[in-house]
Image (cartoon, rainbow, N blue to C red):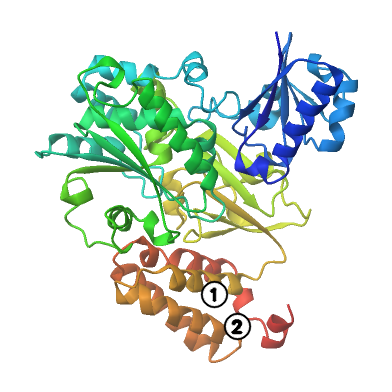
Amino acid sequence: MSAQIFVPGDSAALSVGADAVAAALSREARNRGVDVAIVRTGSRGLFWLEPLVEVETAAGRKGYGSVSIEDVRSLFECGFLSGGAHPKSLGALEDIPYLKRQQRLVFARCGLTDPLSLDDYRRQGGLMGLEAALRLGPNATVDEVLASGLRGRGGAGFPTGIKWRTVAVAASDRKYVVCNADEGDSGTFADRMLMEGDPFLLIEGMAIAGVSVGATMGYVYIRSEYPHAFATFSRAIDRARSAGLLGQRVLGSSHAFDLEARLGAGAYICGEETSLLESLEGKRGEVRAKPPLPAISGLFGKPTVINNVLSLASVPWILGHGASAYAEYGVGRSRGSQPFQLAGNIRHGGLVELAFGATLRELVEGFGGGTWSGRPIRAVQVGGPLGAYFPESLLDTPLDYESMAAAKGMLGHGGIVVFDDRVDMAHQARFAFAFCAKESCGKCTPCRIGSTRGAETVGKIIAGLDREKNVELLRDLCEVMTDGSLCALGGLMALPVLSALDHFSEDFARAPARAAAE
């Protein structure tokens, strides 16, 4: 029997040479007359160890990382196929504290299996949720999702079961399920990791949604910057359809549901659900006024469930293990787990899935190991480019929806970007406005014009022009954008700007010469 070697095919691993390492391993084994099978997996999410190579031994899987092509010969010489000691040895990855302390529900399989093997998926507990949903029936399935307390993982935190119930009871000749995989927030990559590393999980979640609400067609809207995710997910759809997981009789049942992957055009605004629907319909990505809500009149005017990747990917676990088991994780009204993504100036960047309630400090110091530069942490942005900047004094804030809102922040998609003490927060505030100006769809005046005026106003403050007057004007502008914008792009602009202004006021009071010099 061939020795099994696991090498990630995830984009993060590919970016640091995983393909070259896989080829070198194959070549070295062939030269030595050793029979090996190289399995390309997803990533475990320990990015500082990529490319991360694992081998199946009599004592279980053993890891080595980060592996370069120069390490390959010495790996064979040390007997790594049987777990031999090597300077890159990591032992059993499950014993590494970074992984051991996590509560992986959604990402339990990622990095372990061949992403495109349905047999692997089934062996690791896949399809239990869909089979349970087919046994329970539509109404009871929606009840389970409601009872679990699952909320939208895309940012808004709206109860998923309520969306599903609204679509389920709506009278229509056709309904849709749409997955928002337009993961455009800075410092986020969980959706990509899942689509590349465990695509059948998302397919299963969408099939459960379709069966539950009476939808017969689903679409996954994937951002154009994710070519590997799009290719892997498209292949997974084809295999799922061939295996009867999708089509006219889902797993042999009387329910019909099919899927199609669509590639976005690179607009950040299409992460907003109504802009995404406009784009799916072949129109310019532009925000729709609400009401009507998409659950009543969504894609092509029909009732539509629209959820984020992580929301839909949570559903199979809920149905497979029960709503009460899922609700045991988390705190307050924030139930279940959240995959957090650590990025920016951080020593151990990667994915950490935890039950709600851990603190920001636990993430950036306990898991992330502090800054990559070794300098003090000055600011941490949570929730993407529209999220608030937290100073070191607020790092003990719990990461749940209510605690973050009380601290004038938001969880968003779980992206966490770390900055050391060299960051200039006035320039970050100006960047926030400039980003909004570039990405605005232009439909509403507060966002379209306000973002441009905001960047100009912060520029004047940095230059030392009428500083007090312009700070007051900046606060007024943030209020107008919050209250008057059609969607969250303009509506959340105040979070990064005001948090920078409130927590790092000294950066807005620097002498112009110093600001320019830095």
Q: Badges 2 and 1: C-beta atoms under 8 Å apart?
A: yes
Q: Does residue 285 lie above or below 87 as drawn?
A: below
Q: Is residue 356 visible?
A: no
Query: Disc 2 vs disc 1: which is toward the camera?
Result: 1
On the rendered image, what quadrant is the N terminus found in? top right
Residue wearing tag 2: 462
Residue wearing tag 1: 430
Q: In the image, what residue occupies the spot 17% across and 34% down?
A: 168
Camera-side residue of 507 and 216: 216
Amino acid type at mark 2:
Ile
Real-space Cα separation, disc 2 to disc 1, in angstroms? 9 Å
Camera-side residue of 300 and 451: 300
On the rendered image, what quadrant is the C terminus found in? bottom right
Q: Is residue 383 visible?
A: yes
Residue 329, x across and y down, in percent? 45, 28
Q: Residues within 10 Å of mark 2 (few under 14, many from 20)?
A: many
Residue 71, x across and y down, in percent? 86, 33
| SS assignment at label 2 | helix
Q: In the image, what residue occupies the spot 79% across and 28% down?
A: 27
Residue 294, x across and y down, in percent? 22, 49
Q: Quadrant of residue 401?
A: top left
Camera-side residue of 492 and 130: 130
